[in-house]
Structures are given as structure tokens and as C-alpha cells.
């Protein structure tokens, strides 16, 4: 009997940003294991190179080093990805900046960089995929990694929350515009997930603070793989009738 697994991604070329660590890294490994060929993007060249030892044999992987705060350079980046691996079927934007600071200390350049990487880069990637020169023409899927902080308030997270809330709204409108092209657009909103960035923050907490934050998640802190599973679901045919949605993957954080 033929393989009827709707999660298989054989023959599809997916661009994954922020692929050197955390959610982006686990997502790249997951999609590749499901059969996708990849263009992996990050500003950390050494981190991207270290992925090679973890990829399963088979489909190709092309590494692209880029700083996504350079919005004007994203079109050329995507062109390089297409030249190296063929037209794209999807984009997963995992790259992001998370800085916690009170609003009184925020500087204009700082919050604009957060917004550029978290939100404007996502818009430019969506714009690029809409092009006939870039889009393979079928199985189109865009997934943006948002955050529960775009839905609830948190002291010190003004710029970060702004960027993620804007990302959710942008994705809904983009989903309507790209639906006639057969491209779905969705967000995933994680809660607190154990990544290298989170572990840096966790080291600043005492045990009482760490426990208080974890207790906000009825299922405990998440792992990067938990979010990667959700990405795979939305990218693959399992999510073929889902667009304009934000899938919350938060261990129950928002249920409280």
C-alpha cells in the first residue's frame, strides 16, 4: 500500500530562518527528517555549519548566512535560496529577537531592530514567496513563530509583545491575499520554551522565580521539539485547510 502519511514533505523546498539554534534548529531537523529539502538561514555561520552532523542523509540542505534586520537584503537572500535549491514551497520564520527591558529604558534603535527582525522580515519573506520566480506553485505554506506575549501583557516586554501582536495581525491579512495562490499563512504562539536563549534568562532567576514561571504552564516548560511538531503539522498536508490562524502551543499558559 502506498505511503499515506500526510506529514511527509518529500519533494518540497522549505526556507527556515533562525536555524542555528533553539526552535529554528529543531524545526529544520524535523522538516528534513520528514523529507523536505531545506534552505537554512541564520547570521550565526558556525551554528549553521554545526547542523550538518545532525541532518539525516538524503535531501539537500543549503546554508545561507544573513542578518534579517537588513530588510532590503531579503529579496537577494531568497533569490540565492532558489538558485541553490529550486523554487520554494514554504517559509518558516523562526528568527527573532527577545529583549526584556522596562519601557523607560527602551531606545528607538533597539525597538526598531526587534520589530525589523520579528515582523518586517516576516512580511518581506511572505512578499517574496508570492512571486512566481520564487513560489513552486503548490503546497504553499508560511509559518511565523509568534508568542503568547502577543496576546497577554508582561512587564518589560513592550517591544517584543508589539512585534508579535503585529505578526499575528499581519498573518491574518496576508493569508487572505495569498489564498488564491494556494499559499496558507499561519502563526504559532509558544509559551516559555527551553532554548539556549531561555536558559540564559533562567540563570538570572532564583529557584522561587523559576518555579513561579513554570507553574504558569500547567504542563511545565516546553521544549523546542514541541514547537517543531506544530510547525510540521502546519507546513504539511495535515494543515492544508488551515490558514489565517494562530496555533497556541503553550503548555496551558493561556488557559489560566
Image (cartoon, rainbow, N blue to C red):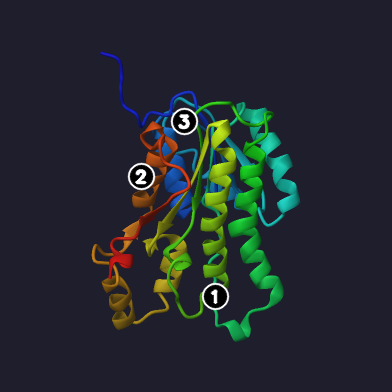
Tell me the residue at 45%/76% (across/down): 154
Tell me the residue at 60%/52% (across/down): 44
How many neighbours does mark 3 have within 10 angstroms: few (below 14), some (14-19), or many (20 or more)? many
Q: Tell me, for residue 38, which label it has, or none.
A: none
Q: Tell me, for residue 229, which label it has, or none.
A: 2
Q: How many marks?
A: 3
Disc 2 to disc 1: CB gap under 8 Å: no
**Residue, disc 3:** 36
Q: Secondary structure at mark 3?
A: loop
Tell me the residue at 66%/65% (across/down): 113
* Residue 204 percent location from the top left of the image: 42, 78
- Position of 132 relative to 22 (above/below): above
Sequence-wise first label, 1 or 3:
3
- Position of 202 relative to 36 (above/below): below
Q: Alpha carbon of mark 1 to alpha carbon of mark 3: how far?
A: 36 Å
Left or right: residue 21 versus residue 82 is: left
* Residue 199 percent location from the top left of the image: 41, 67
Q: Secondary structure at mark 2?
A: helix
Residue closest to the eye, 55 or 250: 250
Sequence-wise first label, 3 or 2:
3
Residue closest to the eye, 178 or 189: 178
Left or right: residue 13 versus residue 105 is: left
- Is residue 189 in view from this perspective? yes
How many neighbours does mark 2 have within 10 angstroms: few (below 14), some (14-19), or many (20 or more)? some
Q: Alpha carbon of mark 3 to alpha carbon of mark 2: how far?
A: 14 Å
Hey, which quadrant is residue 209 in on the image? bottom left
Q: Alpha carbon of mark 2 to alpha carbon of mark 1: how far?
A: 28 Å
How many neighbours does mark 1 have within 10 angstroms: few (below 14), some (14-19), or many (20 or more)? some
Disc 3 to disc 2: CB gap under 8 Å: no
**Residue, disc 1:** 158
Which numbered mark, 1 or 3, is in the foreground of this view? 1
Amino acid at each position: 500500500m502506498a505511503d499515506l502519511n500526510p506529514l511527509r514533505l518529500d519533494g518540497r523546498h522549505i526556507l527556515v530562518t533562525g536555524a542555528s539554534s533553539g526552535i529554528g534548529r529543531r524545526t529544520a531537523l524535523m522538516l528534513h527528517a520528514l523529507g523536505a529539502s531545506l534552505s537554512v538561514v541564520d547570521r550565526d555561520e558556525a551554528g549553521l555549519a554545526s547542523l550538518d552532523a545532525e541532518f539525516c542523509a538524503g535531501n539537500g540542505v543549503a546554508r545561507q548566512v544573513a542578518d534579517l534586520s537588513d530588510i532590503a537584503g531579503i529579496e537577494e537572500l531568497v533569490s540565492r535560496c532558489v538558485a541553490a535549491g529550486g523554487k520554494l514551497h514554504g517559509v518558516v520564520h523562526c528568527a527573532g529577537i527577545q529583549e526584556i527591558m522596562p519601557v523607560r529604558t527602551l531606545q528607538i534603535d533597539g525597538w526598531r531592530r526587534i520589530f525589523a527582525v520579528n515582523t518586517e522580515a516576516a512580511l518581506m519573506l511572505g512578499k517574496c514567496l508570492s512571486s512566481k520566480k520564487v513560489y513552486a506553485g503548490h503546497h504553499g505554506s508560511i509559518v511565523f513563530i509568534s508568542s503568547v506575549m502577543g496576546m497577554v501583557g508582561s512587564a518589560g516586554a513592550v517591544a517584543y509583545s508589539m512585534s508579535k501582536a503585529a505578526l499575528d495581525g499581519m498573518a491574518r491579512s496576508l493569508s487572505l491575499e495569498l489564498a488564491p495562490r494556494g499559499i496558507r499563512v499561519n502563526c504559532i504562539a509558544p509559551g516559555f520554551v527551553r532554548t539556549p536563549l531561555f536558559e540564559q534568562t533562567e540563570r538570572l532567576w532564583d529557584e522561587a522565580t523559576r518555579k513561579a514561571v513554570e507553574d504558569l504552564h500547567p504542563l511545565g516548560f516546553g521544549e523546542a521539539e514541541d514547537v517543531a511538531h506544530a510547525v510540521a503539522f502546519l507546513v504539511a498536508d495535515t494543515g492544508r485547510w488551515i490558514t489565517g490562524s494562530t496555533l497556541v502551543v503553550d503548555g496551558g499558559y493561556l488557559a489560566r
